[in-house]
Amino acid sequence: MSAAPHKAGRPVSVWTSLHYFNIYRLIVASLFLLAVAFYPRTSGLGSQNLALFVWTNLAYWLLAVFFYAALKRLRGRFDRLLGLEMAVDILAITLMMYASGGSKSGLAIMLLVSLAGAGLVGQGRLALFYAAMATLAVLLEQAWRVLETGADLADFVQTGILCMGFFATAITARLLARRIIANEDLARQRGIDLANQLSVSERVIRDMQDGVMVVDARERVRQWNPQAEALFGMRAPEHADLASFSQALAEKYRAFRDGRKEEGGILRLPGGGLLRLRFVHAGESGDILIYIEDAGRIRQQAQQMKLAALGRLTASIAHEIRNPLSAISHAAELLREEKRSDGQARLSRIINDNAQRLERLVRNVLELGRRDQVATETIPLRGFLENFLDELALHEEYDRSIFSLAADAQAQLLFDRGHLNQVLWNLLTNARRYCSGQPGSVRIEVRERPATRQVELNVSDDGAGIEEEESAKIFEPFFTRHSKGTGLGLYIARELCEANDAFLEWAGNAPGAHFRITGRSRQWLENRNEEGDRA
């Protein structure tokens, strides 16, 4: 933020003072001319030499007009201009004082006014120089009067006292000017600091996540930030009141103002959102500050923190469970190999099946804990999917003909290879579980979207599909319709997709469940590299 405006190295206030000083000079010269014109005998002006007084005053008036008109053109020479004006004042007033009978005419007082003005607008020791000039002029005028008219030498005492007044006036005016300039600089600097502080405060209030309102006693909203409008989902009019934002908010404001309620509370919006209110008195002005927080956002952040802590705890527990679980599975295998009765074999099989189920659950939880360890690469989908389907059919003992693949040979997806393997394993094992088992009953299609620089990977089957009431729960953890499922497969698949800046969604039934992965293509990466090169 810039400082207060200066012209030719001087504050504007100094030039304004000099402007008024010129107006004063012009008024004084005009009054003298009028007094001489209408009251030549009774005014006492020019009583000793009227012609000298008139011509001197007329020249003084013309020079005053010149100084007033030339002020704007001589901004670069302040000290010279002030010195010239003071020289004209001293000479003209001294001559008019001589023409009016000397210091007894009272015109010497006009020199005191000129010296005071010069001391207030000038700088340094020039004020003393102007006082010395005035003193010399008055003493010369008095000496000339003594020599010419034989005036009383005692008049020098009165003139000397007047000269002492010249220096006292100049020094006092200069000290006052220094104090005024110091106070003006301090006020200007404080104004700059205040303006900067207001600018910072306005920026902070404008960009903060909470809404802020300033409301007066008549419920008029004097100020508000954009977040307040966003929280209420509206565009406020220029002269808004609280009711234009929310009638319920206006009622809570009245309750706080009348002392019927403390600080604030929770405000429920018509759309179902929750806002936390806090009322604070803004001082002696009577205004009230209203702070508005999105309670839903706060709860969501708290929930995320709880989930993150729970995730870390779960991963730790899963890691600790894995070793004893492996021992249980190994012991169950040994029991099954021994010759036991059918009942004991059945119990051994139950132990082994449940141990394997727990093993899958632990493996899924540990896999979820590694979602942030992403090593993105460009994956040619056709070749990757062909190899993946062969591996899946071999490992799970599926008929390879169940899966049909339709993929563009040029389609490439930016994804972590291990994450994509885990996501497809979950999607395709689910599709195989619910499909008819006929050749081509599970369809994998890859489509490239050049307009959006994205790739779509679709997985669908010909099973019964997903019911509408269950569609909102399928990505929730531990939700499953299968008796031996863990309920974490789709949840982990979506988390891994989000870690790779992709999106997994249920796209409806066609007729079986249809899932779609939308991720970034190689074209997106090339476009970003081109933008980086241009930058």
Image (tube, rainbow, N blue to C red):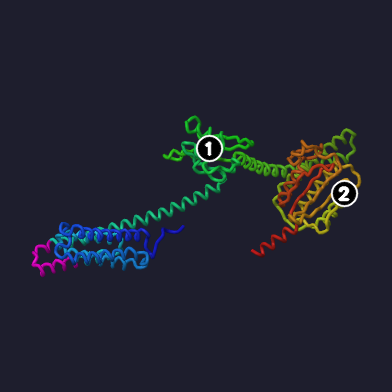
Residue sitting nearer the eye, 88 or 69: 69
First in sequence: mark 1 vs mark 2: 1
The image quadrant where one finds the C terminus is: bottom right
Magenta span: 136-157
Q: Residue 8: which quarter of the image? A: bottom left
| Residue 104 highlighted magenta (yes or no) | no
Q: Is residue 380 visible?
A: yes
Could you tell me how far apart the alpha carbons at marks 1 and 2 are, in whole angstroms?
62 Å
Q: What residue is shown with label 1?
A: 242
Residue sitting nearer the eye, 24 or 206: 24
The answer to whether residue 155 is left or right of residue 11 is left
Residue at 18%, 66% (x, y): give it: 51
Looking at numbered disc 2 in the image, what kind of residue is underneath it?
A: Phe
Residue sitting nearer the eye, 39 or 479: 39
Q: What residue is shown with label 2?
A: 403
Residue at 13%, 69% (x, y): give it: 144
Where in the figure is residue 403, as x and y percent of width and height? Answer: 87, 49
Where in the figure is residue 377, as x and y percent of width and height? Answer: 75, 57
Q: Is residue 174 visible?
A: no
SS for callout 2: strand
